[in-house]
Image (tube, rainbow, N blue to C red):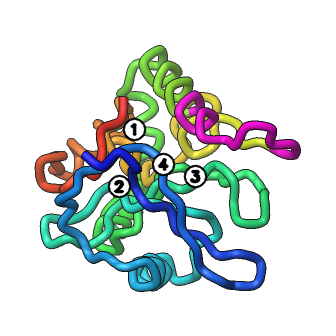
């Protein structure tokens, strides 16, 4: 493990790219590397430039980004609505189909409401721990996908689950899609 942690990439208001590090990651992370290259790859996957600092926290076995972890504030200081973002286009499409088939309602009905509420609380606590000390201004709120309770977005729940989060709605979606965390390379563990 690297003591300096994953590299978060960002752009200043002038467009200049820079990076900084937080938490620990494995030194042998197999994915594509390189500051500008990784920012460009994630921008391609999103279909737009990233609006917040991020770190790739889950990769495919081939090394491509699957999930990014966003900083809690966007580059312009606004709260970032989604901490874990599913960037793999094929997996995003599969989750979209699941949602279109009533997956959000089905997941909400299938998972224990108390377990889901605790997951939202853990997600919010983890995110809030990364807000810079002394930050004044709007702060992110809610839990997974910005909601305080229930299921709002299976993409967000699955992304957090893939990143190691204990999310019953993410686990439900993974089960319906036939996914296993072992299919992916995680840069770090979450609880």
Observer-nearest residue: 167 or 137?
137
Q: In the rendered image of this protein, does residue 109 appear above or below residue 113?
A: below
Q: In the rendered image of this protein, does residue 134 appear above or below residue 6?
A: above
The outermost residue toward the front is 3
Residue 50, picture quadrant: bottom right
Callout 3: helix, strand or loop? Answer: loop
Lower position in the chain sequence, tag 1 or tag 2: 2
The outermost residue toward the top is 114
Lower position in the chain sequence, tag 3 or tag 4: 4
> In the picture, which quadrant includes the N terminus?
top left
Lower position in the chain sequence, tag 3 or tag 2: 2
Q: What stretch is highlighted in magenta?
A: 124-138
Report x, y in % for residue 34: 36, 79
Label 1, label 4: how far apart the Cα atoms are: 36 Å
Lower position in the chain sequence, tag 1 or tag 4: 4
Horizontal side of 183 relative to 163 (left or right) equals left
Is residue 147 on the magenta stretch? Answer: no
Horizontal side of 172 relative to 19 (left or right) equals left
Residue drawn at x 18%, y 50% as measured from the top left = 179
What residue sits right under mark 3 in the picture?
A: 82
Callout 2: helix, strand or loop? Answer: strand
Observer-nearest residue: 13 or 65?
13
Q: Residue 57 carries which label?
A: 2
Horizontal side of 132 relative to 153 (left or right) equals right
Q: Main secondary structure of the magenta part?
A: loop
Report x, y in % for residue 36: 46, 84
Q: Few, some or many C-alpha atoms within 10 Å of disc 4 (few <14, some 14-19, many ≥20)?
A: few
Report x, y in % for residue 100: 43, 59
What residue sits right under mark 1 in the picture?
A: 106
Q: Are marks 1 and 2 in contact (CB under 8 Å)?
A: no
């Amino acid at each position: 493990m690297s003591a300096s942690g994953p590299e978060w990439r960002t752009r200043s208001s002038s467009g200049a790219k820079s990076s900084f590090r937080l938490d620990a990651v494995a030194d042998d992370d197999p994915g594509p590397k390189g500051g500008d290259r990784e920012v460009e790859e994630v921008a391609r996957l999103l279909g737009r430039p990233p609006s917040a600092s991020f770190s790739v926290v889950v990769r495919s076995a081939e090394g491509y980004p699957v999930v990014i972890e966003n900083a809690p504030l966007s580059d312009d200081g606004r709260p970032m609505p989604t901490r874990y973002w599913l960037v793999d286009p094929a997996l995003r499409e599969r989750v979209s189909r699941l949602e279109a088939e009533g997956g959000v309602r089905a997941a909400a009905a299938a998972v224990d409401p108390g377990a889901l509420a605790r997951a939202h609380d853990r997600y919010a606590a983890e995110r809030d721990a990364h807000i810079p000390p002394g930050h004044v201004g709007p702060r992110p709120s809610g839990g997974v996908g910005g909601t305080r309770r229930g299921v709002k977005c299976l993409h967000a729940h699955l992304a957090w689950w893939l990143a190691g989060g204990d999310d019953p709605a993410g686990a439900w979606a993974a089960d319906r899609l036939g996914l296993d965390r072992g299919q992916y390379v995680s840069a770090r563990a979450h609880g």
